[in-house]
């Protein structure tokens, strides 16, 4: 019986191992968790290195495009088949860096002319300048707004869509409370 008991104890010792050495290969649950975490991190990194941008209007193939992060507007336009012959990109900043979820709309010459006519009509009616339709010339008539800031306002509007309130104009780089206080009674949406 002592031999049998010794044999059982030795077998248990041999098969289960002692200390750091084991004769059976076991899967360490921490390794599995780390491998899953590494995989999830890789997927997150891949997702965060690309953005999705919608390109619409006077381009060859309007749609949603997956682009590399920090891509420029011209890359999105190229991905959408380039500008059509009827496109008016005079107010579109093609060097601007894109953001995830952004929409780029390229107006046709005809659409832009219609907006300008509408803006002139509205301005004539109440004397206020509609910041959603104003041209560079109209915006430069505002105090504190030069040609560069007017172009920035239009580029921001083209890249981000229409302003929802006159306060939104402060989202344009270089337009703070000081300039806003000078123009807020002269503008509308």
Image (cartoon, helix red, strand yellow):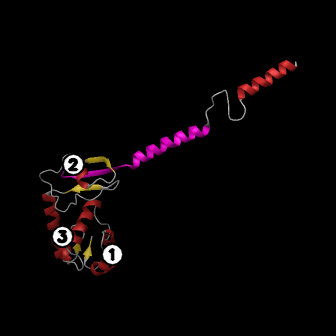
Q: Earlier in the sequence, mark 1 or mark 2?
A: 2
Mark 3 touching mark 1, by CB under 8 A? no
Distance between the alpha carbons at the discs numbered 2 and 3:
26 Å
What label does residue 78 carry, if any?
Answer: 2
Q: In front here: 112 or 27?
A: 27
Residue 140 falls in image quadrant: bottom left
Characterize the local packing of mark 2: few (<14), some (14-19) or many (20 or more) Cα atoms within 10 angstroms.
Answer: some
Q: Which residue is mark 3?
A: 136
In the rendered image, residue 180 lying in the magenta stretch gets the answer no
Distance between the alpha carbons at the discs numbered 3 and 1:
19 Å
The residue depicted at 24 percent of the width and 58 percent of the height is 95
Q: In front here: 100 or 42?
A: 42
Q: Earlier in the sequence, mark 2 or mark 3?
A: 2
In the rendered image, residue 39 lying in the magenta stretch gets the answer yes
Q: Nearer the viewer, mark 2 or mark 3?
A: 2
The residue depicted at 71 percent of the width and 35 percent of the height is 19
Q: Which residue is mark 1?
A: 176
Please state the horizontal and vertical placement of residue 36, each as a whole percent of the image.
52, 40
Distance between the alpha carbons at the discs numbered 1 and 2:
34 Å
In this rendering, is residue 69 above or below 146? above
Q: Main secondary structure of the magenta part?
A: helix
Mark 1 touching mark 2, by CB under 8 A? no
What label does residue 41 carry, if any?
Answer: none
The span shown in magenta is 29-58
Please state the horizontal and vertical placement of residue 176, each as a whole percent of the image.
33, 75
Please state the horizontal and vertical placement of residue 22, each as a whole percent of the image.
67, 30
In this rendering, is residue 1 above or below 73? above
- Left or right side of 60 for 20: right
Quadrant including the N terminus: top right
Please state the horizontal and vertical placement of residue 100, each as a whole percent of the image.
35, 54
């Amino acid at each position: 019986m002592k031999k049998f008991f010794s044999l059982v104890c030795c077998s248990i010792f041999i098969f289960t191992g002692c200390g750091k050495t084991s004769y059976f290969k076991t899967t360490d649950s921490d390794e599995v968790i780390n491998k899953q975490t590494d995989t999830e991190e890789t997927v997150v990194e891949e997702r965060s290195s690309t953005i999705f941008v919608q390109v619409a209007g006077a381009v060859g193939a309007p749609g949603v495009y997956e682009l590399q992060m920090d891509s420029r507007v011209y890359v999105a336009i190229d991905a959408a088949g380039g500008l059509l012959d009827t496109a008016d990109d005079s107010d579109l900043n093609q060097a601007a860096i894109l953001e995830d979820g952004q929409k780029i709309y390229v107006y046709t010459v005809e659409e832009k002319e219609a907006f300008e006519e509408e803006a002139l009509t509205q301005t004539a009616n109440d004397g206020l300048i509609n910041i959603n339709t104003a041209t560079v010339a109209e915006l430069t008539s505002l105090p504190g707004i030069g040609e560069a800031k007017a172009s920035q306002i239009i580029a921001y509007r083209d890249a981000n869509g229409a302003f929802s309130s006159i306060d939104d104009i402060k989202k344009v780089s270089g337009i703070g409370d000081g300039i806003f206080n000078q123009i807020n009674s002269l503008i509308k949406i």
